[in-house]
Amino acid sequence: MSKEKPAGSEKLWGGRFAEATAHSVEAFTSSIQYDSRLYSYDIAGSKAHAAMLKRQGVLTQDELDAVIDGLSAIEKEIDGGSFVFKSELEDVHMNIEKALVDKIGPAGAKLHSARSRNDQIALDLRLYLRDQCDRFAVLLTDAQKTCVSLARHYLGDIMPGYTHLQRAQPVLISHHMLAYYEMFGRDRQRILDCRKRINLSPLGCAALAGTGLPIDRESVAEELGFDGVTANSMDSSGDRDFAIEFVSCCALIQTHLSRISEELVLWSSQEFSFVDISDKFCTGSSIMPQKKNPDIPELIRGKSGRVIGSLMTLFTLLKGLPLTYNRDLQEDKEPVFDAVDTVSASLSIMAELLGNLRFNTDRMKKATQTGFITATDLADYLVMKNVPFREAHGIVGRSVAFCIEKGCELEDLQLDDLQKFSPAIGEDVYAVLSVDGSVNSRLSTGGTARKRVEEAIEKAEKQLGMV
């Protein structure tokens, strides 16, 4: 008479368990509700692993064919929405493996030879994030193109530049938009640099110590498009540095989006009236019929907290973990997925919004007519007249105080009044006190002079393939 099968053996890992897992434990430990999005990567990794096992003599050709056909059928079912993920099978790996065994029998049970769910999930997440790096690079390029298009369209138009949110010096609108082109460019460089460290295969490290079976990690890595394999099996099974680095890049992208969102919120207010955000990207008030609210920039600004929070979650998750894999690492995927979803959506809609943005150029130019915005130009003028800068700074400061008392701007002062503060001031001073003169005098590399900005636009357009 055969011995009764232990209840715990219903699990693929249940051989040493005598009791069935409590339903509450199954519900608490299941990750399938979110890691199911990794199914295509899990299947791709399994196919490459199976092909290697065949080359190494662990699987026969018939078994390999059955595994590949079975995995392809499962992927087709998932794509079509007919596949039922079961929470009692915990995760994407066990759901797919159980379905494969049910379809093809013992050959499916051989697939897990020489690997663990520890290196399997590390592989899936690396494959997923590698694709996200490529996708983000495209989205960031789109954002850059929008900034450059605006810079080209508004070339020559002037606005106040700010420090401490106080009018500081006049700049070209184009120069301002190219600042975000540079930010998004650094974001793109960072995400592609992060991709290099993601693009190493952990498969074959197994649970933590590697495997005694005759595997070929390098051939699997090559088949999956990796640059190589990870070097240490213990590090590989518990490593999530690559995920932290990726989400760190996400946090910085979202921070840059938040900065431009803050400006759009300010600029679209009646107090500024610098920009008109298309009605398509605004909402109204349920009680105040006159309102046009910049909800998209506000939401992007608000979502920066989510992405930064995801980064802090991953840091906190990893900081107390001993080597190697610990179940805590199951909690890595939700913050990663949320960061991916939030940043990709924010980048897409920001590029769309900017593509429909209109600058109120007359209002912006008018805003440069007050606030002593060419005061630094007067100081530079005095420096060119051989006045030490600190002395020039004081002269201009006293001139501004005089203007405040008189209720006028620097360019409104008579030459006699200006010369009371310094005899070095001559009739040629009025050329530098004009806003246009100020802008076009900033010829230093990276400056706001039209000549420099036009050069920067041309360079950006070539880099982005826009010409």
Image (cartoon, helix red, strand yellow):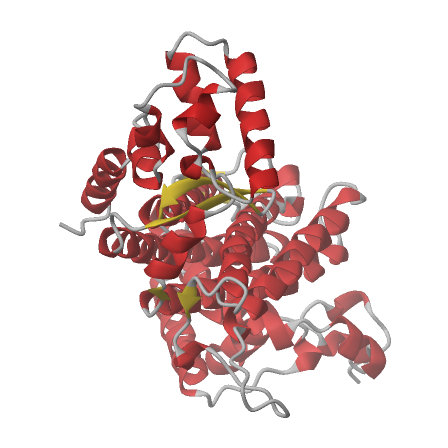
Q: Quadrant of the N terminus?
A: bottom right
In this rendering, position of residue 463 left or right of residue 55: left
| Quarter holding residue 228 | top left
Residue 416 at x, y percent in the picture: 43, 24
Q: Residue furthest left?
A: 467
In this rendering, position of residue 173 left or right of residue 256: left
In this rendering, position of residue 236 left or right of residue 49: right
**Residue 218 visible in the shown view:** no
**Residue appearing at x 54%, y 87% in the figure:** 290
**Residue appearing at x 48%, y 47% in the figure:** 370
Residue 454 at x, y percent in the picture: 22, 40
Residue 158 at x, y percent in the picture: 34, 48
Q: 20 above or below 114?
A: below
Q: How many marks?
A: 0
Viewer-proximal residue, 141 or 426? 426
Q: 152 above or below 417?
A: below
Viewer-proximal residue, 254 or 404? 404
**Residue appearing at x 26%, y 33% in the figure:** 452
**Residue appearing at x 68%, y 73% in the figure:** 90
**Residue 80 visible in the shown view:** yes
Viewer-proximal residue, 130 or 411? 411
Residue 333 at x, y percent in the picture: 62, 62
Q: 394 above or below 21?
A: above
| Quarter holding residue 335 | bottom right
Viewer-proximal residue, 58 or 25? 25
